[in-house]
Image (tube, coloured by chain):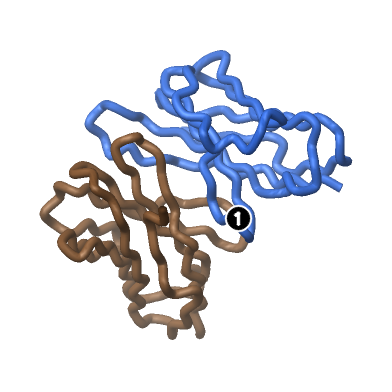
Chain colours: A brown, B blue
Amino acid sequence: AQKITQTQPGMFVQEKEAVTLDCTYDTSDQSYGLFWYKQPSSGEMIFLIYQGSYDEQNATEGRYSLNFQKARKSANLVISASQLGDSAMYFCAMRDDDYKLSFGAGTTVTVRA
Amino acid sequence: DAGVIQSPRHEVTEMGQEVTLRCKPISGHNSLFWYRQTMMRGLELLIYFNNNVPIDDSGMPEDRFSAKMPNASFSTLKIQPSEPRDSAVYFCASSLLGQGAQETQYFGPGTRLLVL
């Protein structure tokens, strides 16, 4: 069963603007973690941000913030003040009780100057 | 501190040959994960170790794939014999599990494997 859904295959954003990447998840576990990773064209997987299922506040890391809506099972990533270097593939992932990560299909973000 | 180290970064081999991918996790991490990334299937977990013990190998495609972790600082993923459909990027990741931490997995740079 698909656990992570990213419905946006690709997005364009103007430099200095904000962009929201959608992610919904499915789990029956009470304890789980949600992650976002960035994969630039060079191929490495870069950890961006984490949200625990019991965290009441939305996670933030610099220009990245995670809009966590537990009842809706969504964990959207917001990138503020986009930069050209933000052009990459972005993956949402979920860790549930067995410690394994399940990844979504990814969203390609292209930042335009 | 050094991140996860993988070698080789690129591997081109012929069908039927043995391929060995290597990984050195982040020092102090107690868990190691092997993933495969393809266009068709995305990122898939192959196997993971906790304290050098294989915990879940349900993602290993078939008997041609094997993985070992002889100590806390080294793991191998072996494909024997290799087939063209094994062509993919193979990632190793490590994390610190069970310590009340975020248990974030940190990825190595990956090995791009091409089987001709």
Left or right position of B77 against A107: right
Check the image and report above or below for B45 versus B80.
below
A86 sits to left or right of B12: left
Examine the rendering and report whether any part of residue A26 can be seen: yes
Residue B24 position, x and y percent, is 56, 28
Residue at 15% from the left image edge and 50% from the top image edge = A55
Element under disc 1: loop
Badge 1: few (under 14), some or many (20 or more) residues near its Cα, within 10 Å? Answer: some
User: Where residue B56 sits in the image (x, y, percent)?
Assistant: 47, 29
Tell me where residue A81 appears, x and y as whole percent: 35, 76
* Residue that sits furthest to the top in the current view: B70
| Quarter holding residue A70 | bottom left
Chain of the residue under label 1: A
Residue appearing at x 35%, y 50% in the figure: A94
* Rendered position, B79 above or below A35: above
Point 33% across, 29% down: residue? B97
Residue B111, quarter of picture:
top right
- Residue B104 place in picture, x, y as percent: 36, 41
Residue at horizontal 22 percent and vertical 56 percent from the top: A59
Residue at numbered disc 1: A43
Q: Nearer the viewer, residue B34 or A18?
A: B34
Q: Amino acid at mark 1?
A: Gly
Whether residue B98 sits left or right of residue B19 in the image: it is left
Q: Which residue extends farthest front? A: A1
Camera-side residue of A99 and A37: A99
Total number of numbered discs in the rendering: 1
Seen from the viewer's position, the closer of residues A1 and B72 is: A1
Give the side of residue A65 with respect to residue A107, left or right: left
Q: In the displayed orientation, state which residue is furthest to the left.
A: A56
Asked whether residue B2 is in view, the answer is no
